[in-house]
Amino acid sequence: MQIGIIGYMIKAQINDKELVEHIESLPKDEMAVFVMADGRVRGALFHGTRFVNQMRAQHNLGILETMILGQASLCGALLIPTMKGKEHMGWRYEVDGPAAGFSVEADSSGYVRGYLFNEHIPVEKPLENWNLAPFLGNGTMTMTTAREGDKVPSSSSVEILYKNITKDLAWYFLQSEQIQTAFNTSVYMDTKGRVAGAGGMFLQVLPETGGTKKNGSSSASGADMKEDAHLIEKVENAFSAAPSLGKWFSEKGEIDDIVYGLFREFNPAVAVRRSVIYDCPCSEESFAKYIRSLPKAELDDIKKNDPDPLEICCRNCGSIYHIPMANL
């Protein structure tokens, strides 16, 4: 896992002029990280229309594939505000359904990359809705975290419970970190199957840092627990009332109108605004270096039997490199 390296992938161009004009008419992609309810709740709202369109262009995905990897990548972006310092997270979602799953990585420097295990998902009949459960199925999700200074990354896995990307990610946080978390992602397609808008949001209700509000004892009182349950219920109700984020951003909706409107009773305050992009730290030299490190017999076989230049495709971002044999 690489931490904090950004910006070498070959950026795929979006050639649909009408789509490009629409994207350029929208507010810029941006993430707002906010706190509310006297610091008990933290969250982030991400406008990611350009982000998802770039992801789709990199992998040349169809509509269904864009919906799945788009939701997963938006969730990846929303993992970034949960990171501490320089950190890199890898998320594998492995299932027995037609989609097979995905791998998504997010880095604290502000990039996300990922790929589907099956980029051509078989569809037996026209889609009637965006319920992705039939294409996902049962399986396991694993989160791997690498922090600066770690000798080895840490990882933990949970069983996939809901066959729903956002709900399963929230389930992971509840199981692994005992934190009440909710994710909401939305990829809005126009009538021509183009991504007209995309966005995501997450909220976490943080535990008390210790003691009751009144006497500072080491365990929460029944009154405190009841108050926490009431706070969670109110936050969940507000969260559930959010508009379709993809449609909202496709219609030039603003981030602040949701943060300060939807959650006004909790006195929200935006703490940080930042950019998150779909990018990858791959490069021609990094692939060449890897190939040169192969065992001599394997390297000699490549030089003897493979075409010159050698074509390498980065699985994470779809970039294609042509490496002359003379460089190996």
Image (spheres, helix red, strand yellow):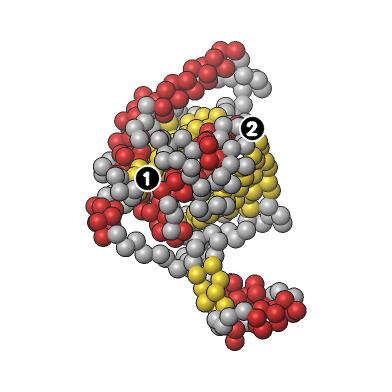
Write the residue at 69% across / 48% down: 154
Residue 74 at x, y = what percent? 46, 46
The kind of secondary structure element at disc 2 is helix
Callout 1 amino acid: Ala
**In the drawing, what numbered circle is on residue 175?**
2
How far is mark 1 from mark 2, CA to CA? 28 Å
Q: Is residue 89 left or right of residue 275?
A: right
Residue 4 at x, y = what percent? 54, 60
Within 10 Å of disc 1 (Cα), the crowding (few <14, some 14-19, many 20+) is many
Residue 307 at x, y = what percent? 58, 80
Q: Nearer the viewer, residue 286 or 2?
A: 286
Check the image and report above or below for 25 versus 217. below
Answer with the quarter of the image where residue 215 lies: top right
**In the drawing, what numbered circle is on residue 198?**
1
The kind of secondary structure element at disc 1 is strand
Callout 2 amino acid: Gln
Q: Is residue 113 left or right of residue 158?
A: left
Q: Is residue 195 left or right of residue 103?
A: left
Residue 54 at x, y = what percent? 40, 57
Write the residue at 50% across / 32% down: 182
Write the residue at 36% across / 38% down: 245
Answer with the quarter of the image where residue 241 lies: top left
Answer with the quarter of the image where residue 35 lies: top left
Q: Residue furthest front?
A: 124
